[in-house]
Image (spheres, coloured by chain):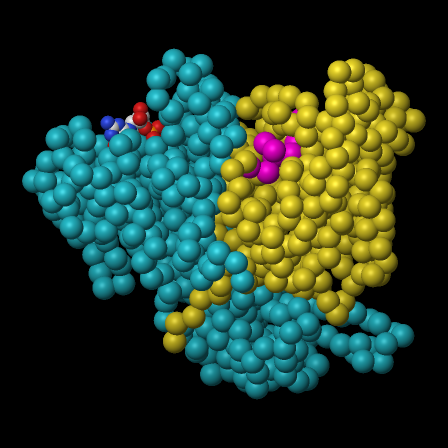
Chain colours: A yellow, B cyan
Amino acid sequence: MKKLLTHLDWLESEAIHIMREVAGQCSNPVLLFSGGKDSLCLLRIAEKAFRPGRFPFPLMHIDTGHNYSEVINFRDKKVRDLNERLIVASLEDSMKKGTIVLKSNDEPRNKYQSITLLEAIEEYGFDCCIGGARRDEEKARAKERIMSFRDEFGQWDPKNQRPELWDLYNAKVHKGENIRAFPISNWTEMDVWQYIERENLELPSIYFAHKRDIVRRNESIVPITEVTPIKAGEKIENIMVRFRTVGDITCTAPVESEADDVNKIILETASTVITERGATRLDDQTSDAAMEERKKEGYF
Amino acid sequence: MTEQKNNNVLRFMTCGSVDDGKSTLIGRLLFDSKMILTDTLNQIEKTSKKRGMNAIDLSLITDGLQAEREQGITIDVAYRYFTTGTRKYIIADAPGHEQYTRNMVTAASTAQLAIILVDARKGLLTQTRRHTYLSKLVGIKHILVAINKMDLIDHDESSYHQICKDYLQFANDIDLVSPGVNIEFIPMSALNGDMIVERGDSLTWFKGPTLFEFLEKLDTSEDIKESTLRFPVQFVCRPHASDNKELHDFRAFMGRIESGLLKVNDKIKVLPSGHESKVIEIRVGDQLINEAIPEQSVTVSLSNEIDISRGDMLVHQNDSINAVKDFSAMVCWLAEAPLSLSRTYLVMHTTRVSKVKITQIHHKVNIQNLEMENAETLKTNDIAQLSFKLAQPLIVDNYEDNRSTGAFIIVDESTYHTVGAGMIQSIA
Ligand SMILES: Nc1nc2c(ncn2[C@@H]2O[C@H](COP(=O)(O)OP(=O)(O)O)[C@@H](O)[C@H]2O)c(=O)[nH]1
Ligand SMILES: [Mg+2]
């Protein structure tokens, strides 16, 4: 008899296997949950991996304080529906403690997330963080292991990664060290959307096309909000847009789109010409090596 | 559903010497099959210009890390993805540089197909032989020899045939040629894009498929032998839901089918304990299924209460496999620190961990000429046959018979680094 899993079943099965390895090997893991589409896939995978039991880890949101309210409401509803525990580690707390010092209040906060994350890891004693990063997102990620080792400072050393063979994952760490586990490493943006469609996953509304006030700035579309005000000489337009990622308002840009359901997004993704991060992350474009620099500093 | 109907996943690796054109080939494959997106292209164009190149250098697509961009070499395995109408591809771009043999073994460990590049001007090199040997060692069943840079030898047909002949001779010498192994050849120019996705008009004498056609048609499915069920338990589900009658005593075993079939009503036994039971239910999420196939992650309920924990393995009752504490294996040493025969290490095998002592180094493979040598120790990139003595019994198969239960990694007890990769050869 010959039988192969379809690509979505294969990806799902691999991700379940990785999550169960984390649960089996690590003593105090946590799942990073942002309310975004990749982490929503992780939650569905966790359900398939561990139900009817509870998740063997809490969820944690690294909150920049710069959120779309739709996303936060959605996050809280999702956690209630799942009946799991959510920890919110907020950048504002690190700012109060003085461990994060902003240069200005409207500065993009993504790069400071690693500080709050490391503080939370230390406070709760987590030995593994499960994240929704994908290797297709960015060049530096293409080389990252599925179970990626971080030293006491949360740093990733791309030249000294643990070899990862077959699907034998080595998640062993000493106290203070940490593993970042990426169950959907091998998924592309298209795979994520197809999975969302197949599993009928609910998403925050800002993923779907809606009317929004924006300005056009340096070839990007910038939504006008409290923390991203209009600048002199700019003109506000009200157009149909959707977000391809959700995150800190100041560094998440929408794309023009009429796609108001998952199926239309899949069609649009199939014919799209700009990679996800290039289009929608205002902070990654600075240099070819931007992501690699940030990862070395402990960004997930 | 929509346009993308993907039937399955094909994982392949590319290998060859430095500058044979691996990165260019992958770049060409992605570019011509329209899988590169414009902002990536813009960046590559900028970088190409910065380095003083006129045309776009397609190898920049896969060469991801800063150090590589500076030195212009690939230093670690990078993974790339593309999807066609038929399947999803996962590409591991393995480095050709000598000191990075361990990365090649890493990439090979999950690959079903190896694309081995040969520079048409140079023919078979030591590196080609080494990569072929390693592909065989790691059990890759499909090998495509991509004879690249045909444009530099005027697309000469007889040179191509000579290289094919030399390769098959070598493959025969190392016992690679066998009914279970599929070896094919394609002449190409990755730079010009001939025989990658398009046929081009320079290699009209070649009647075989383009690389793309070859990939789309390749059948990697293997006969599932029902009787070889291997189900290592990863996690035991005990909800302990005292407020929920149905879940109060619920217990289920979570894991992935590594080989064989698991069906409802199957009579199974648990190794190493030997306790017997029957399969009541198999689930994927909340969906009940009747049978689970290899690579499927499932949740299994059994008919009676027996003691099972992570690291145990479910097999069929009539299976004669036993837990063992001694075996010999081919090992690729991955760490900077040399192997020490006086230390104990950890072995991670399926979901089980055991302390281990290496009792003997039988011989080391000289990777230059593939001859056997004596050795006192092993250093990075060495490949050798070793004997192991385990503290805990493991349920193993020979690697040749089972890539999952025949494989293990060696972990340093104090640093926790992964220091070796092992493939079981014989069970004592
Ligand atoms: N003439 C010619 N040059 C090629 C071909 N394929 C690759 N090259 C060139 O060979 C060099 C090395 O290619 P690269 O893809 O980086 O090789 P890698 O080290 O195997 O990844 C580059 O300058 C390529 O442009 C080919 O088919 N014909
Ligand atoms: Mg290269």
Residue A5 visible (yes or no): yes
Q: Position of residue B118 (x, y in %)?
A: 23, 37
Q: Residue furthest left?
A: B158
State which quarter of the image contains the C terminus of chain A.
top right
- Magenta span contains residue B238: no
Ligand 1 visible in quadrant = top left
Range drawn in magenta: A275-283
Residue shown at the point (62%, 70%) measured from the top left: B284
Q: Is residue A164 left or right of residue A56?
A: left
Residue shown at the point (68%, 26%) measured from the top left: A216
Residue shown at the point (51%, 45%) measured from the top left: A271
Q: Is residue B57 above or below residue B7?
A: above
Count numbered badges in the picture: 0
- Magenta span contains residue A276: yes
Residue B342 visible (yes or no): no
**Residue B223 vs residue A277, the one in the foreground:** A277
**Residue B30 vs residue A92, the one in the foreground:** B30
Q: Is residue A146 above or below residue A235?
A: below
**Residue A7 vs residue B325, the one in the foreground:** A7
Q: Is residue B141 left or right of residue B229?
A: left
State which quarter of the image contains the N terminus of chain A.
bottom left
Q: Position of residue B72 (x, y in %)?
A: 41, 22
Q: Position of residue A159 (x, y in %)?
A: 52, 29
Residue shown at the point (27%, 63%) measured from the top left: B180
Q: Position of residue A43 (x, y in %)?
A: 71, 56
Q: Is residue A32 left or right of residue B352?
A: right
